[in-house]
Image (tube, rainbow, N blue to C red):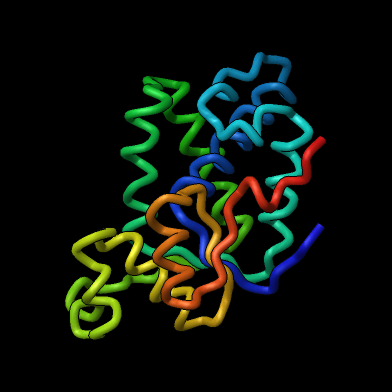
Amino acid sequence: MDTFPKAVIDSGPLFDALVCNYDLKRVASGRRARYGSILDDVLQSKHSQQYFLTFLASIREKLTTAHVMAELYGLEKRRLKLYGPDLSEFWRTSIDLLLQWRIDEHLIKLLDLASHASLAICLPEIGVTDTGLIELAARHGCILITRDARTLAREAHVRHVDCRLVQQLIPSV
């Protein structure tokens, strides 16, 4: 398993981790997993889900942006559509995991991004969240973990930021 001392985590992989954690906790308490089907293909097995959570836990410093944290709520509403006790349980297990990981949430301001000439170029194309993730990874000299090969990973590579896709991090079983 590759380990990285520090990484910036995008909303897709972070949400996948929260879903994996939620489903694995459900199974451990004798209930059935409910949401594996919404995960990336590479995360369809229980083994790959456990590996992914262990991999992320092994990163000593996990960074993300306030924009990503805000996106998690929308992802839950769109993809899981939980209500009542299930919704409370999802967020309780999610917050417990984020606290356990000591995830470091940074505010990357739109006006700061717009003032960087090189970032201002990609800002209109990929948006505040993705541009902020690239800036955070560049600022800390660390990898960026995403599922977004089409826009975020492409733009990160153009900006010489080491970007890894989830599918590259999970060994094929």
Relative to 125, 95 lies left or right:
right
Question: What residue appears at the point 64 percent right and 46 percent down from the top-left corner?
Answer: 167
Towards the viewer: 75 or 91: 75
Question: What residue appears at the point 55 percent right and 59 percent down from the top-left corner?
Answer: 145
Relative to 24, 74 lies left or right:
left
Towards the viewer: 170 or 58: 170
Q: Quick one: quadrant of the N terminus?
A: bottom right
Question: What residue appears at the point 52 percent right and 66 percent down from the top-left corner?
Answer: 8
Q: x, y (%) of residue 169? A: 69, 52
Q: x, y (%) of residue 166? A: 61, 49
- Quarter-wise, where is residue 68 in the image? bottom left
Q: x, y (%) of residue 164? A: 59, 59
Whether 140 is drawn above or below 22: the answer is: below
Whether 3 is drawn above or below 81: the answer is: below
Question: What residue appears at the point 68 percent right and 30 percent down from the top-left corner?
Answer: 24
Towards the viewer: 138 or 97: 138
Q: x, y (%) of residue 51? A: 76, 44
